[in-house]
Image (cartoon, rainbow, N blue to C red):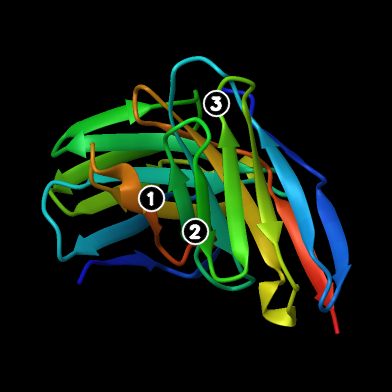
């Protein structure tokens, strides 16, 4: 069966420090991968998506970047964190065009930038 | 960024009562409409994916309807139970297969 792992669960980082969040998927090949963020009191916002190794699309201008070094690995990074980067980050995968099962989400990372 | 609106933002329901809430979305470039349940300390879990105008889906006491021409979907909970307490997210999937989420409706079921 397919599973998705996301870590760490919580992270407290000082302003200006680097960031690396990792997400891996098991049990499937060539998934579409996504990074979402939920800022306080708001809905899920799509940050990045990837349809294959090395292929990254950014949805909103921001202080973050994403990479997909392997088929089932998706990494969210920053060189220097800002206070506004605080939020709840979710990784997700899907198989397209077979969207009938919806997206499968990881357990999320609560990032607090201090 | 597509405009997906959910209302109300939150609601409180007495155990045993039924309730419903709304998701509105763009009526153009429609591919699918997703509903997710997001319980505290857990990952969002897919409830329904609907693609056809007039679709009705049901899972236990929860059901959903879809109107793609006017751009809305309703989620119904019949005979609410405490375990139904969660945030319910809808998401619009456009023709480029990207999901745009609403802010969610948080349901609290009082025993």
Q: Quadrant of the N terminus of chain B?
A: top right
Cα gap from disc 2 to disc 1, whole angstroms: 8 Å
- Could you say which quadrant of the image residue A44 lies in? top right
Q: Which residue has dot 1 on it?
A: A102
* Residue occupied by mark 3: B68
Q: Which comes before the other along the chain, label 3 or label 2?
A: 2
Which numbered marker is on residue A25? none
B99 shown above or below A90: above
Residue B98's image quarter? Answer: top left
What label does residue B47 carry, if any?
2
Q: Is residue A90 left or right of residue B23?
A: left
Pointer 3 with pointer 2, Cβ within 8 A: no
Q: Is the residue under label 1 in contact with that under label 2 (CB below 8 Å)?
A: yes
Mark whose residue sits in front, 3 or 1: 3
Residue that appears at 34% across and 53% down: A101
| Residue B108 locus on image (x, y percent) | 80, 69
Subunit of label 2:
B
Say which element carries label 1: loop
- Residue at 69% x, 56% y is B76
| Nearer the camera: disc 3 or disc 2 | 3
Where residue B34 appears, x then y in whole percent? 49, 44
Q: Residue furthest bottom?
A: B111
Q: Residue at x 67, y 79 (%)?
A: B83
Query: What is the distance, in whole Å, between disc 3 and disc 2 at their CAs?
Result: 18 Å
Secondary structure category for the residue under label 2: strand
């Amino acid at each position: 069966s397919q599973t998705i792992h996301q870590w760490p669960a919580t992270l407290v980082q000082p302003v200006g420090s680097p960031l690396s969040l990792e997400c891996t998927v098991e049990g499937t090949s060539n998934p579409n991968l996504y990074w979402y963020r939920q800022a306080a009191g708001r809905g899920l916002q799509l940050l990045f998506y990837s349809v294959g190794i090395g292929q990254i699309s950014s949805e909103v201008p921001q202080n973050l970047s994403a990479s997909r070094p392997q088929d089932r690995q998706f990494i969210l990074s920053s060189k220097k964190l800002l206070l506004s980067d605080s939020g709840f980050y979710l990784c997700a995968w899907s198989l397209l065009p077979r969207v009938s099962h919806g997206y499968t989400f990881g357990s999320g990372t609560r990032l607090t930038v201090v | 960024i597509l405009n997906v609106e959910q209302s109300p933002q939150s609601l409180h329901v007495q155990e045993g009562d039924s309730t419903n809430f709304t998701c509105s979305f763009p009526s153009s470039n429609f591919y699918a409409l997703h509903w997710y349940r997001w319980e505290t300390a857990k990952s969002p879990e897919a409830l329904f994916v609907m693609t056809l105008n007039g679709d009705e889906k049901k899972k236990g006491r929860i059901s959903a309807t879809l109107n793609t021409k006017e751009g809305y979907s309703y989620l119904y909970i019949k005979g609410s139970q405490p375990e139904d307490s969660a945030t319910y997210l809808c998401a619009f999937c456009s023709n480029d297969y990207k999901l745009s989420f609403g802010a969610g409706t948080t349901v609290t079921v009082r025993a």
